Amino acid sequence: MSFELKKYHEPDFESEPLCSAPNAVLHPAPLDGVAPEGYHASSIYPEYFKIDGEWLFARDSRMDCVPVYENGRIHVREFRHLHEGDLVVCGRSENGEEGVLVHENGFLERQRIEQKFAFRQGRSRETAYSKEYDDFYELLNYERDHGRIVWVMGPAFAFNSYSRDAFSRIVANGYAHAVLAGNALATHDLEGAYLHTALGQDIETQESVEGGHYNHLDTINRVRYHGSISNFIKEEGIDNGIMYTLEKYRVPYVLAGSIRDDGPLPPVYSDVYEAQNAMRAQVRCATTVICMATALHTIATGNMTPTYRVLEDGTVRQVYFYCVDIDEFTVNKLADRGSLSSRGIVTNVQDFIGLVAKGLNLYDKHARR
Amino acid sequence: MSFELKKYHEPDFESEPLCSAPNAVLHPAPLDGVAPEGYHASSIYPEYFKIDGEWLFARDSRMDCVPVYENGRIHVREFRHLHEGDLVVCGRSENGEEGVLVHENGFLERQRIEQKFAFRQGRSRETAYSKEYDDFYELLNYERDHGRIVWVMGPAFAFNSYSRDAFSRIVANGYAHAVLAGNALATHDLEGAYLHTALGQDIETQESVEGGHYNHLDTINRVRYHGSISNFIKEEGIDNGIMYTLEKYRVPYVLAGSIRDDGPLPPVYSDVYEAQNAMRAQVRCATTVICMATALHTIATGNMTPTYRVLEDGTVRQVYFYCVDIDEFTVNKLADRGSLSSRGIVTNVQDFIGLVAKGLNLYDKHARR
Amino acid sequence: MSFELKKYHEPDFESEPLCSAPNAVLHPAPLDGVAPEGYHASSIYPEYFKIDGEWLFARDSRMDCVPVYENGRIHVREFRHLHEGDLVVCGRSENGEEGVLVHENGFLERQRIEQKFAFRQGRSRETAYSKEYDDFYELLNYERDHGRIVWVMGPAFAFNSYSRDAFSRIVANGYAHAVLAGNALATHDLEGAYLHTALGQDIETQESVEGGHYNHLDTINRVRYHGSISNFIKEEGIDNGIMYTLEKYRVPYVLAGSIRDDGPLPPVYSDVYEAQNAMRAQVRCATTVICMATALHTIATGNMTPTYRVLEDGTVRQVYFYCVDIDEFTVNKLADRGSLSSRGIVTNVQDFIGLVAKGLNLYDKHARR
Amino acid sequence: MSFELKKYHEPDFESEPLCSAPNAVLHPAPLDGVAPEGYHASSIYPEYFKIDGEWLFARDSRMDCVPVYENGRIHVREFRHLHEGDLVVCGRSENGEEGVLVHENGFLERQRIEQKFAFRQGRSRETAYSKEYDDFYELLNYERDHGRIVWVMGPAFAFNSYSRDAFSRIVANGYAHAVLAGNALATHDLEGAYLHTALGQDIETQESVEGGHYNHLDTINRVRYHGSISNFIKEEGIDNGIMYTLEKYRVPYVLAGSIRDDGPLPPVYSDVYEAQNAMRAQVRCATTVICMATALHTIATGNMTPTYRVLEDGTVRQVYFYCVDIDEFTVNKLADRGSLSSRGIVTNVQDFIGLVAKGLNLYDKHARR
């Protein structure tokens, strides 16, 4: 059984209260970066706004931002990107009565709408994940060719030669269209390629090497010397690892800085809101997002990922969102988004990525791209 | 590189303080189940006791019990098994001065003894486990033919068709010589075979079935009707699962009762100290013990597993002890045993057992026994 | 504002489908310890069974057991307590149509019934507990005089002089009517009183004392010598701690054995199903149950605690059930009971019990009883 | 017994290998932001560098940075702050042989140095903390008058009226000299003051208020309207909470941005390395640092906090570092710093801060400053 997209059901604009709804109220932003009182805040769902008698669809949305009407379209914009005078949709009811409609159930079969709470179940170490894995492999195979897969990664992958290799195969075989991570993932992955350690432990044998506590600093210092990760890879003849594979296959990546960082490595964003912009630029065209082993980046990405995507041909499709973490707290925090398309898996991400690479049969194949 | 046993180094009884040590003091137990004041308590290490001028080796030991001298041998006995008048070794120094020697470093290369603290490292979700897995597969292949592998299991395996199947292959291929578990593992595994659910969820699709909350009770009731798990399997035509495979290949199992139990299933021990006896009977000849996803059974088994085993030909060899759990608290609790041979792996055990079955190449083989 | 019991609303037996419901079906148990096919299993809620045209109330219930009709009354009985021929209620619908009614909403105000899902919320480290604590103190003050408070405790309390003292004050001031625990709590508490350590660490300064790893075994051995905890306390002049205070104020306690135990201490139940019986005997008249820092005993107690109690005067009242644990997994496992009266608090239980003792103003009072 | 500082023992520069050590090697930084090969990286301990025959002390240090010799002094500088040509100390041995001395045991009594590993113990939910709390209250009372206390806080405090109030009392009574936090703490605390909710739940009763999911956005938008937290507090008449109390008593705070943020609030640092600078400016004069309920800020602060501080009169004293978190993973991650002065407490921080405010007797006092 292979993967199939669920059909999107548009709202019925001919029925009440939609057909006799007033136009949505628009008020200008009073200052740069400030919304007018009573602004509407966007959700993760498809939303429609009645302007001049017509229901406009927010094609490109994210949670907790404001809809701005501009040049005949709705733009969902972060508060910090508002300009004085921007026309912001106001109104906080969600059923259309004020010209604002949040359409939660567009991907649900009609008969399932009333049961939908049954699908929301907590995820824990005791949840059975075997079907989840099978569905996931099917989804990835579909998305490789028809979608766009964004991986969000904590540093744990870089500590282990096995998981570095597994993820490199995933990239080399076309299953990654972008990667979002931080300074630490890149640092430890490059340390592995440059000095064969992660935080001073051999990535094969896990034995501590002498003076190994210098290795991550030496790696960072050397990358800074070369001016960029890409130069470092070329000049130092790096030929393995996650960053190497991303560069080789020209897969875009965003490294967002944090107050924990050493260094940082040259292409890391020091401004977190510019980092958010760069992340959203990748998420904006993602159709599947997989967050692994990082509370910080997972929540940040969850905040900016809607449940749907409008394809170039106008099709509205679901966005699949996975959160994989050994910590039930993180997994359940994301599940509170309450979306049908958000799924949690509680496990060690090293094992997860190894299972995925095996499940996709990547150990007996050559790189595809 | 294939697995090799480490050589055991006997203490040097010719050197001081051993060569001029006095005989160990023996005092009779004052009452049934009570040790004399000053009794010596056993550890997880090999121990020697000087009796009548000769150093006797406790061939069969466990932690926190007392050495009894009887018929020319040392027997390490639980307090509750002491009889009034049993001759108990007394003395609490461990270096031989009182005729009692705890020999901690028998399996360490001489030159490594002074560095041994470096090997004790915390285990967490961020530990790199790739070499651990490779070593583990080699160990299992060695032990299948030359040792005895005891698996200690919580109920999580039974919730998932994939992990049930993986563990069944491990049993069918000779990698399990005994299983220690509780009422819940057996209940949910048999529920899976009988009604295709675990706690009412389909074990393939994980969907809740109607009235499924009765399924574990119906299974228990039916096993009780047939009088035993073995009769139930025969009479109801059960042909899959963990309990079925254990019965088929005549692998012994001990099911220990707890206050949480429904039922219980007929062969479950209601007396926890009789259950301890039955568990120790299996552990007594184990050479590798793997505890997965159960704090209760893991700690119980850890308490009764020494670091060594005396083979029939007199060879003293290491016992390997693994603790696999998603909860670092449990893993680290065991690691406090401080033994070289105890290893922790922090992950979801469903993924673990799947990886192990794949690592042992059990998906393209027929059952071996 | 002081605590008030919620009023219980009986089902309306005059309305449909109750008024025209048939009698419940009764079938005899086919064997000792085995229910007939189609048996009804009890829940945590009040249940009614129509027998000979009359709705009989199960005054004394617990989850996952079977209703037996005997001498004109309904007895909710564990499977293992069934006798061949016992008349068991059969039927699995719960709305009365088969003469079996599960009455979930007896304590809810009418207007709140349809909103009740809003009250079910996950509990985590980020939940705000200040009101919970205030309500809890009010509840305890009410229950001390009008109810029966059962505490279920893991061993953590015994490791710390502060929490031992706090709980002793709670007992001395009448806030504990029974305690359910295991061998470890009693062992470490008595070790504290006898040798001023817990697992070999001084309970005031937390420093390890020399030879301290013998202390818990010495304590157990001494209790076994005296034949019981109560004799040990008298003969050894113990004058502080949890077990001492329970004995002094004649508060009943049940110590259930487990496969992890050393010893055991003489009054510990070795048979877990006899332990269940003894625990249920205490829970049967409990009006508030507080489980702290023990997954094993908490789940066991949760299984046998209904949401209601019938007082001597016939009043039906709620039973309050708290689960306090640092591990969200345990807390949420209990919350799946889905009962209005079950509450989880995620914290370190040493801090919890200290706050409770302060909140009840027990540091400036003398013992009350 | 009241708190006393431990005496600092200078290295014995007259003994070998120090007295005949060569001068440390100095090499110029090859580029801005890049250290020369072989640079020395600083630790959390006091370090000395032999320059021109004299041992210079790094008075102001932090981990994983480089010592720069400038104007006759040693400055410990982040890589990103290096300028081309800066004279960087090179050499990786730590015992003085290369003119670089890491002085780990300056605060240890001589006789305890060889035993020091015994003091390093894991911290878990089962650790007994009663003495820890007593010591902590004494420390805080000492530091209020003679030191500088920096608190590092996650958002959990703001969700609960009780913990907001407790921390406000701590500030009002002089126990906080600086606070390091993020956008979320400030947002939810101000939401509490402005709209009496946190994430839409009433901070007293924890009930969800209608439309409450807008409250944090409305608060942020209003703060942005007023241009700063300080203006918002004045213009909107805010009179309670953590941010209000910090402003009232002019306690400096640093709010560091992260990619998770909504808004952000005006004074939040968008550049994480500027945030690091601002944080280090506070930590530079801290004598006690308490990190609570935030992995991100705790690790960031741990990275920049040394074990010692040089007071104005030249005294070298210990810096006390606490990590309080419900997650053992975070607590133990910090404990790996291996410092005598780093302590972990595993609990819910709401309970922790309530206990601390009670332990300092802040409920029957007026504000002190």
Image: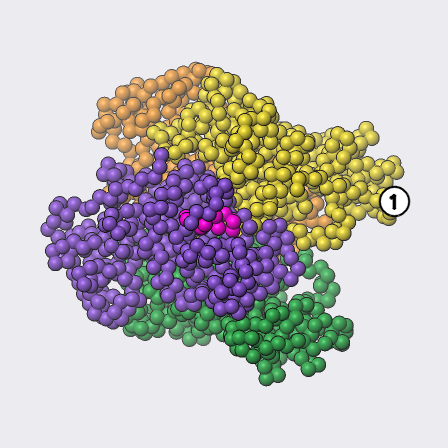
Chain colours: A purple, B yellow, C orange, D green
Could you say where residue A160 lies in the image, as x and y percent from the top left? Answer: 55, 51
- The one of B42 and A65 positioned closer to us in this rendering: A65
User: Residue shown at 31%/39% (left/top)?
Assistant: A4
Left or right relative to B107: residue D164? left
Binning the other alpha carbons within 10 Å of mark 1 as few (below 14), some (14 to 19) or many (20 upward) gives: few
Location of residue A56 in the rendering, given as x and y in whole percent from the top left corner: 18, 55
Element at badge 1? loop
Mark 1 belongs to which amino acid?
A: Glu
Q: Nearer the viewer, residue D108 or A32?
A: A32
Residue span colored magenta? A163-175
Instruction: Tell me, yes or no, if residue A123 can be seen here.
Output: yes
Q: Is residue B268 above or below residue A26?
A: above
Left or right: residue A56 versus residue A184 is left
Residue at label 1?
B14
Say whether residue B256 is left or right of residue B99.
Answer: left
Q: Where in the figure is residue B251, as x and y percent of width and height?
A: 59, 25
State the residue lying farthest toward the bottom: D71
Q: Chain of mark 1?
A: B
Give the overall secondary structure of the magenta segment.
helix
The residue drawn where x is 54% and y is 43% is B325
**Residue B282 horizontal side relative to residue D326, left or right:** right
Residue A173 located within the stretch drawn in magenta: yes
Residue at position x 74%, y 51% from top? B112
Q: Is residue C116 magenta?
A: no
